[in-house]
Image: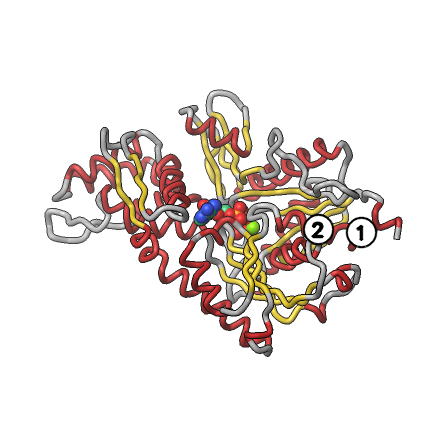
Amino acid sequence: MSAIFEPVDACGIDFGTSNSTAGWSRPGERALLPLEGDKLTLPSVIFFHAEDDEVSYGRAALADYLEGHEGRLMRSLKSLLGSSMMDDFTEVAGRAVPFRTLLAQFIGELKRRAEQSAGRDFTRAVLGRPVFFVDDDPVADQRAQDTLEAIARQAGLRDIAFQYEPIAAAFDYESQISREELVLVVDIGGGTSDFTLIRVGPERAGRAERRDDILASGGVHIGGTDFDKSLSLASVMPMLGLGSLLKTGRLMPSAPFFNLATWHTINQAYSRKSVAEINDLHREASDKPKLERLQSLVRERAGHWLAMQVEEAKIALSNAPETQIDIGRIAPGEAVTLQRDALDRAIGGQVLSVEQTVARLLKDAGVAVSAVDTVFFTGGSSGVPLLRQRVQALVPQARCVEGDLFGSIGAGLALDALRKFV
Ligand SMILES: Nc1ncnc2c1ncn2[C@@H]1O[C@H](COP(=O)(O)OP(=O)(O)OP(=O)(O)O)[C@@H](O)[C@H]1O
Ligand SMILES: [Mg+2]
């Protein structure tokens, strides 16, 4: 038994769409390692400064961008895994750099910070992965995992195992309970919603093989960044001209607005071609003030800033029925008022898909819904009230437990690393 409590040179790495964590199990200590000052998460963000070759990560990257430094901000890099953009190049400080290299740079930094915090090197790791990197395409899904594995090797990890993120969350929950339960884990993050129905309990926790405990797992490629995009397209981009008419009576083309509402295509709106198109649209627009806001946004390179305002408003609506987005930076003195109803309408289709995925999982598991003892919520987007209500309504008699929304996966991966690599 004592060997189990020796710290191993293995860690758990939760590379998330929005936030990343690293966990290292040690007796009597919290698994999660500080990654930025005393913070246990490192936002999955890189900022490349244009003035010099400085690169900043996490909160510092966001702050550098918001302070107005010239440069290139990258977020939501995980969404590129398994996408056709993975082998594309993007311009960083005047150079064409493959997205793959940016991903490797972030993961390398994550590992370095974990090692610095732990005071030792890690050569072995359990990496979290969503149940599906790519929906309905097993070949692309495997390619995504292979890419992540190759990047982790490049960062110096030699032994690598993968674990589904919701199963990791279940292990974290399991470490806190004293009797056996059937738990539905609901992990709704920035990029994906992942679920598992699993039997957990103190006696089962020590077992190396848990396959029989897992009744079903499932997931769908919907997360908080999709909600940001939907909210932006429904409530903010119309202020910049989306949905308005050209003088010819035709509808305004939507491409620039979609680019600006999607984290990893924001920079495409700044290309010379896109700027020329936006100027043409302004000339042809029947509602010029709207297009002037768009021009101002692009001129100010404020796309990420606006997307952050939208994300903040979405989060605020989890706790309040109404909030405001200050768009003064592109339209002096102006603000957009947002009601929770508008958010619910904007994300309604996505919430329905999540709900249907959970319903299918419960059906496939072949157990009575009434047998589910607990719903364990984790992931930042599980804070969205509509999502919670809808998922809870599928298992009305189950007890609801809220985990550490940003830490359960990393802590569970650390436990898994301990089991897999002793
Ligand atoms: N209180 C809140 N209400 C609603 N959404 C929230 C709240 N807090 C954070 N979020 C959203 O949660 C998301 C980040 O959650 P999390 O850190 O769990 O994702 P992730 O692990 O990085 O992503 P994934 O697991 O999908 O790769 C962001 O989209 C953020 O806007
Ligand atoms: Mg996550």
Pick whichever, 11 or 342, lies toward us: 342
**Residue 97 location in percent, x, y?**
52, 37
Label placed on residue 239: none
Count of marks placed on residues = 2
Instruction: Tell me if I can see residue 86 in this picture.
Output: no
The residue beneath circle 1 is 421
Disc 1 on helix, strand or loop?
helix
Q: Residue furthest right?
A: 2
Say if mark 1 contacts mark 2, CB within 8 Å. Answer: yes
Residue 53 rendering spot, x and y as whole percentages: 54, 24
Q: Earlier in the sequence, mark 1 or mark 2?
A: 2
* Amino acid type shown at disc 1: Phe
> 384 or 120: which is nearer to us?
384
Instruction: Judge by depth and name the residue closer to the eye, 294 or 341.
Output: 341
The quadrant in which residue 264 appears is top left
Find disc 2 in the rendering and name its residue: 126
Q: Quadrant of residue 307?
A: top left
Which kind of residue does numbered mark 2 sit on?
Val
- Residue placed most toward the observer, 222 or 323: 323
Residue at position x 36%, y 42% from top?
Answer: 313
Q: How is colour applied across the structure in the image?
A: secondary structure
Where is residue 62 drawn, in percent x and y?
47, 32
Q: In the image, is 44 to the left or to the right of 199?
A: left
Q: Marks 1 and 2, how far apart in space?
A: 9 Å
**Residue 355 appears in the figure:** yes
Would residue 359 appear left or right of 115 to someone viewing this image?
left
Image height of 177 relative to 29, above or below = below
Identify the residue at image location x=58%, y=48%. Answer: 404
Q: Which residue does the image show at 23% across and 32% down from the upper left?
A: 331
